[in-house]
Each structure stands twice: as C-alpha cells, then as structure tokens.
C-alpha cells in the first residue's frame, strides 16, 4: 500500500502594488463551496505563506465540510499587532470595501471573526453592506464582537451574529 499523496492546495492573495494592503486571501483544496471569513486585518500570510490564523481558518473550514477559505478583513492594512492599524492614515485601504462586498455576496457561510479590536464605526459600515445580514460567528465576546478563530475550540459551531448598534448587540 502506498502512502497517501499530499493534498494540493491552490493559494492566492490580492495585495496592493506596494504590499501594504491585502484585500483577499484564498486557500482551495476541493471543488465545492468555500467558507468566507471576515477578519480584523491581515498579518503575514500571503499567496505562498500561511500564518497561524489562516491555518486555524482552514481547520474550521475542513471540519465544517468546506473545500476552501476566502478571507477578507475590516481593515486591509497588513500589521502583526492590531494597535498598529491606528498609526496609519488609511487602515481600511482603497480597494477593501469592494473586496468585502464581493465576499459578502459569495455562496456559502460567511463567518465574522474580527475579535474585540474593531472600531464601532467600521463595524457599522460593514454591517450596512448588502449580504451582511447573513453573518455568522464561531463565538461572541462579552461585548458582542465576533470572536477570533485562534482563541476558539476546534469544535466551535457557527451561530448568528447580530451587528453592534449603539454599543450593544
């Protein structure tokens, strides 16, 4: 009996020409639906390299029976620390809202997963986009924010997420 072959994963990412912003990231290992994640901001992952968050998102997608992930972010600015978002003039990025609208219109589940560091005005902007009414999450913080995948049990199940308005869900 031969050893199983390594699974082929197609990887892609859409970055700004200067590399400061990442608008989308995809990992696809099958021909079915992709699980979409709306995160806070991109870190180091790109078309050829995963980071711990992307590996975790792939794990959730596989567990839920999906054949890939599509990742977008509230803020497209690439930073390893969330507080660095507030040090630049435009953490959202010039093409990010387009990427979000496309992602929110994709078939399959859309998981809100940006954690507790998003600014309320940005959450409201994204919550007003078409398709945002179908956002789910894998857990909710005590303040009503969708929990980040790195800090969740592997068997977490999607639940409805209700947009925060006026500071309360």
Image (tube, helix red, strand yellow):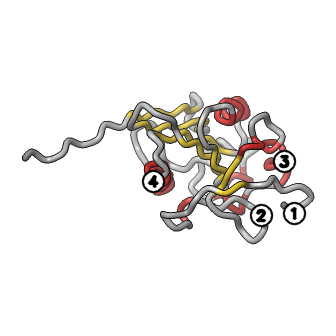
Q: Nearer the viewer, mark 4 or mark 1?
A: 4
User: Is residue 76 visible to us here?
Assistant: yes
**Which residue shows up at 43% across the image and 49% down it?**
62
Q: Give me the residue at 68% from left, 51% from top.
A: 136
User: Do labels 3 and 1 touch, CB within 8 Å?
Assistant: no
Residue furthest left in the image:
1
Q: Tell me where residue 156 appears, x and y as whole percent.
A: 55, 63
Q: Secondary structure at mark 3?
A: helix
The residue beneath circle 1 is 168
x, y percent for residue 126: 78, 42
Determine whether the residue tagged by mark 4 lies in a helix, strand or loop.
helix
CA gap between label 3 and label 1 equals 12 Å
As rendered, which of 72 and 165 lies closer to the eye? 165
Please give the label number shown on residue 63: 4
Q: CA distance from mark 4 to mark 3?
A: 30 Å
Q: Which residue is mark 2?
A: 144
Gap in Å between the C-alphas at discs 4 and 1? Answer: 31 Å
Residue at numbered disc 3: 124
- Count neighbours of disc 3 (C-alpha within 10 A) and say few if under 14, some if 14 to 19, many if 20 or more: some
Residue 136 marker:
none
């Amino acid at each position: 009996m031969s050893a199983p072959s390594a699974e082929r994963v197609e990887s892609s990412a859409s970055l700004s020409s200067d590399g400061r912003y990442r608008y989308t990231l995809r990992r696809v290992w099958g021909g079915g639906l992709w699980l979409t994640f709306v995160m806070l901001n991109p870190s180091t992952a790109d078309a050829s390299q995963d980071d711990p968050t992307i590996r975790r998102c792939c794990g959730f997608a596989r567990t839920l029976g999906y054949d890939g992930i599509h990742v977008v972010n509230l803020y497209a600015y690439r930073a390893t620390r969330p507080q660095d978002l507030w040090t630049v003039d435009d953490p959202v990025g010039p093409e990010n809202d387009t990427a979000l609208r496309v992602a929110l219109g994709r078939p399959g589940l859309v998981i809100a997963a940006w954690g507790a560091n998003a600014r309320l005005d940005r959450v409201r902007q994204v919550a007003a986009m078409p398709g945002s009414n179908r956002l789910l999450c894998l857990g909710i913080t005590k303040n009503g924010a969708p929990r980040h995948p790195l800090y969740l049990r592997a068997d977490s199940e999607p639940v409805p997420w209700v947009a925060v308005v006026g500071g309360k869900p």
